[in-house]
């Protein structure tokens, strides 16, 4: 087991929301551990189980990660938090933010049906966020040409992109490969 880093810029807080989908959560977490690179992960799973069978399944998924059956390229701290009638989602988020405040200022929000197919250099994304105070979010997508907005049930205008690139790549300790830190930037008003 690797030692957990102390520097705040070495940590990424991950919040993954899940409701009644423990199997999807398992797949999402495995893909996240496989593809998010360059930082230590503080993962908070905020879940809601509407029936006892779902709650039992969430406990099974949690136990799989406690036993470290799924490898990660970075150190990971796990926090499993159940939303109940007494503990609202807002309270869980407040608790998570208070806990990670000393560790990091960067939070990745994701959901249980999000799958990671390509490596994502989170350290490069965090550097981008710190490089310019006008940049307030990084959105990881499979492709910059995704144009359909499901909530609106319509196509959206894709803004013009420019490139942000770190001057050096990050080496992957496990595979000896280079992780591309190239990111696309766009102005929100133009898309």
Image: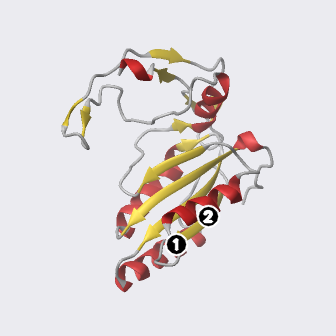
Taking the spot 40% from the left edge, 20% from the top edge, the residue there is 189
Q: Which mark is residue 62?
A: 1
- Between residues 159 and 10, which one lies in front from this camera angle? 159
Q: Residue furthest right?
A: 6
- Between residues 62 and 176, which one lies in front from this camera angle? 62
Residue 81 figure quarter: bottom right
Taking the spot 24% from the left edge, 42% from the top edge, the residue there is 150
From the viewer's perspective, is residue 24 above or below residue 53? Answer: above
Taking the spot 26% from the left edge, 29% from the top edge, the residue there is 147
Which secondary structure lies at badge 2? strand
Q: Position of residue 134 (x, y in %)?
A: 58, 23
- The residue singled out by tag 2 in the image is 78
Q: How is the image coloured?
A: secondary structure
Q: Position of residue 166 (x, y in %)?
A: 62, 20
- In the rendered image, which quarter contains the N terminus? bottom right
Taking the spot 40% from the left edge, 43% from the top edge, the residue there is 117
Q: Horizontal placement of 136 versus 150: left or right? A: right
From the viewer's perspective, is residue 34 above or below residue 18? Answer: above
Look at the numbered discs 2 and 1 and tell me whether their residues touch, using CB distance below 8 Å.
Answer: yes
């Amino acid at each position: 087991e690797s030692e957990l880093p102390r520097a705040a810029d070495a940590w990424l807080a991950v919040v993954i929301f899940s409701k009644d989908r423990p199997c999807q959560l398992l797949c999402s977490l495995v893909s996240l551990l496989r593809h998010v690179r360059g930082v230590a992960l503080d993962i908070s799973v905020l879940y809601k189980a509407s029936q006892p069978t779902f709650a039992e399944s969430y406990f099974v998924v949690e136990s799989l990660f406690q036993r470290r059956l799924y490898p990660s390229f970075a150190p990971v701290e796990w926090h499993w938090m159940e939303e109940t009638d007494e503990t609202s989602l807002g309270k869980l988020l407040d608790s998570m933010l208070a806990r990670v405040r000393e560790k990091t200022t960067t939070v990745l929000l994701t959901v249980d049906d999000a799958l990671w197919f390509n490596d994502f250099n989170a350290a490069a994304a965090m550097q981008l966020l710190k490089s310019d105070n006008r940049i307030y979010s990084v959105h990881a997508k499979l492709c910059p040409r995704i144009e359909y907005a499901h909530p609106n049930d319509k196509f959206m205008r894709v803004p013009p992109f420019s490139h942000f690139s770190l001057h050096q790549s990050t080496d992957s300790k496990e595979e000896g490969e280079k992780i591309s830190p190239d990111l696309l930037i766009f102005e929100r008003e133009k898309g």
